[in-house]
Amino acid sequence: MVKKALDHFQKTDPLLFSFVQEESLKQLTKTDDLFSALCESIVSQQLSIKASDTIFGRLRALMPNNQVVPKSLIRYDIEKLRSVGMSRSKASYVLDLAQKIINKELILEELHTFSDEKVIEELIKVKGIGRWTAQMFLMFALGREDIFSYGDLGIRKAIQKMYKLKQEPTIAQAEKIAEKWKPYRTYACRILWNSL
């Protein structure tokens, strides 16, 4: 699929294609560990990759067998989760997520069958999960190929730099540029991130 995406970009957006680093543009993958992936998405909000990885690693180490699962997570209170470096709000968000899964208000295994918008609609019912977090989940946990996240600062900065705009693109500008990348916008986002 990477080759199809690259062939598409070469035809539709030679400028984007010129920034491709093939060794870093890998096939999208899906994960079976959806709860852990969602927790990691929540933890990573507004953090550097390094900080996020450190905090999530500590959270994993806190869990039996290093497995972040709802029934284990729910045993901890906010203060215990804060001790691994999570903010009070993020600790409450992962606990809310765990509770919704235990109560079967959210059935993660069903998400694979939903449209992108339906996945977003379901996930934003969870406290602390907004559109950006849901889009990152679609890209990195469900392996969806055609996700574009205007809400991602890195993507906006990369578009500004790559297309030599005087300021960050508006939603309309970014979506017009991203239109050329369909149906492989997730791969385009990876190229944008790599370009930074």
Image: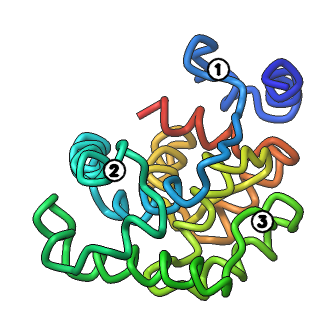
Residue visible at 37% across and 75% down in the picture: 74
Q: Secondary structure at mark 3?
A: helix
Residue visible at 40% across and 73% down in the picture: 94
Real-space Cα separation, disc 2 to disc 3, in angstroms: 26 Å
Location of residue 6 by image quarter: top right
Question: Above or below — where is 147 with respect to 23?
Answer: below
Residue under pointer 3: 111
Question: Above or below — where is 110 with respect to 49?
Answer: below
Which numbered disc flags the more N-terminal residue, 3 or 1? Answer: 1
Amino acid at pointer 1: Ser
**In the image shown, does 182 or 89 lie closer to the viewer?**
89
Amino acid at pointer 3: Leu
- Which numbered disc covers residue 64? 2
Mark 3 crowdedness (10 Å alpha carbons): few <14, some 14-19, many ≥20:
some
- Which numbered disc covers residue 18? 1
Q: Secondary structure at mark 2?
A: helix
Q: How is the image coloured?
A: rainbow
